[in-house]
Image (cartoon, grey):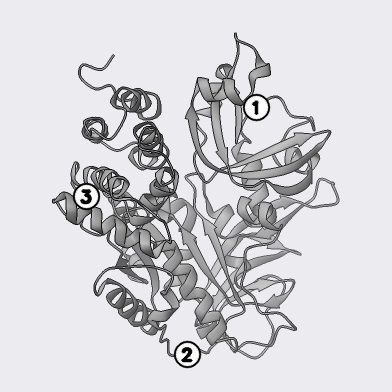
Amino acid sequence: MWGTKKTVSGTWKNIEPGDFLFFYRGGTYEQASLVLGTEENEQLGRDIWPNHGDDDPWVCIIYLDEPVELNLDSSIVHDLAGHDINYVMGFSPLNEMGIGGLRGRYGSIEDLVLGGEPVTTAKTGPEPDIDIRADPEYDVPEDVFDDLYYPGEQLSDIVEQLNAALNAGKHVVFTGPPGTGKTEIARLACEYLVDEHGEVFTGSQITTATADWSTFETVGGYMPEEDGGDRLSFEPGQVLRCFKRDGRQRNDLLVVDEMNRADIDKAFGQLFTLLSGQSVQLPFKRDGTEISITPATVTDGGSAPGTNEYVMPESWRLLATMNSYDKTSLYEMSYAFMRRFSFIHVDAPTVPDDEAGAAELVQSYARVWDLEVDDDTARSVAKVWHVANNTIEDRKIGPAIVEDILAQVAEVSSEHRPRTLTHAIANHVFPQLEGVPRRERVVEALSGLDEVDSARLERLGRDVLQVTLDGAS
């Protein structure tokens, strides 16, 4: 947990779960932590940080995962951001230039924090030569997903569609409400394929799209060379790093989480032609020669690719996730791009209208998650889930978000449950409503539940979602 003063709430309000907080001291970013959630809580701030005075307490709370040792020289970050100073000017976000530079160098912010290299499941030992024209038959078994729970025949249907898509040469987009396990399905499928077909795949990479993505993140672009001079050199982006690293041919499967966050044309436009089976000349040069990306089907398959050439193996696949309610992103995809993908829907379960049935649904998931939940807590969380999924058409949350809520309230006494459940809703449900039309209807319905602190939830709705309910103070 970390906190700060009300005077910097403008920056604090823009922090979202999944962001990273970097901690600076003496010219070094010493540690980084994953943001789990935020909350404005004056009493909690006074209790934890009593030395910050009555007039200026730390009220802006940030809940964090365990810190990770980073020890990153601030000059590296600030040079990429275009700053001419190497110290930190207070509590502030890194600009888009700096974020893009870190992604260009490390693959993603997650890769930087978790190890400095792209997250990969590559096998140990020397890399064997791979057959770039091989495209094996795929048969991902259901037991690969044993750690995930889907009622009825839903998992069987998903796996059947996945295998059919892969064997048809398609890339895959998993669509569905947030929290339905789309990313885990993609990740586990890639891990299985790498293990099962080691002669074809060299690993897998996972990245999360953002609104500021461009072809710089996906394909690559010019970056300052590490010697600190004025020279620029081409640095490959996420997709090209799947095809070659350290001069050696690769075939890393790629998972792009939350593709709907990115501007599809801006981020993936240069890949439209490639995914349609044709070579692409990029507007970049290396050693005076233009960079090219070539499908394996149009190469001779014999010689190693040149320093300026990237070869896309025939078996390479892109697996992406997209929130189903973001129809705009789906419509913005060109037909040439869409026809290379198979869209597999991963829906949230239907929450029964009757209280007992809804509570049993929550308990069925709690048992899978090894969470001990009493009946009253199950009923309370079930009501929240039912309201969240039935107030606005085509707006749902999946079980993973319910798991986060349960984890926050399961051990709380009945006396404090309304307050804790209220905070859990603000932490885990409200972020899914940002920018959603008619979101005030969901806040109003949730505030009407007897199981929450209505006044507090209305205030949080006003602060987090900028909605004011009729009659709210």
The mark found on residue 381 in the picture is none
In-image side of 40 versus 77 (left or right): left
Query: Quick one: label 1 or label 2, which is nearer the N terminus?
Result: 1
Circle 3 Cα neighbour tier, 10 Å, few/some/many (<14 / 14–19 / ≥20): few
> Is there any visible trace of residue 420 in the rendered image?
yes
Give the quarter of the image for residue 458. top left
Tell me the number on the disc at residue 136.
2
Instruction: Give SS at disc 2.
Output: loop
Question: Which residue is under mark 1?
Answer: 91
Relative depth, front residue between 146 and 275: 146
Per the image, the residue denoted by label 3 is: 394
Q: Quadrant of the C terminus?
A: top left
Q: Is residue 337 above or below residue 87?
A: below
Numbered disc 3: secondary structure: loop
Question: Is tag 3's residue or tag 2's residue first in the polypeptide sequence?
Answer: 2
- Secondary structure type for disc 1: loop
Residue 396: x percent and y percent? 27, 50
Kindly identify the amino acid type of the residue bearing the numbered disc 3.
Asp
Query: How far apart, in angstroms, are the residues tagged by discs 3 and 2?
Result: 37 Å
* Mark nearer the N terminus (1 vs 3): 1
Q: Residue at x 64, y 19 (%)?
A: 50
Where residue 71 appears, as percent x and y from the top left, is: 79, 46
Q: Amino acid at mark 2?
A: Pro
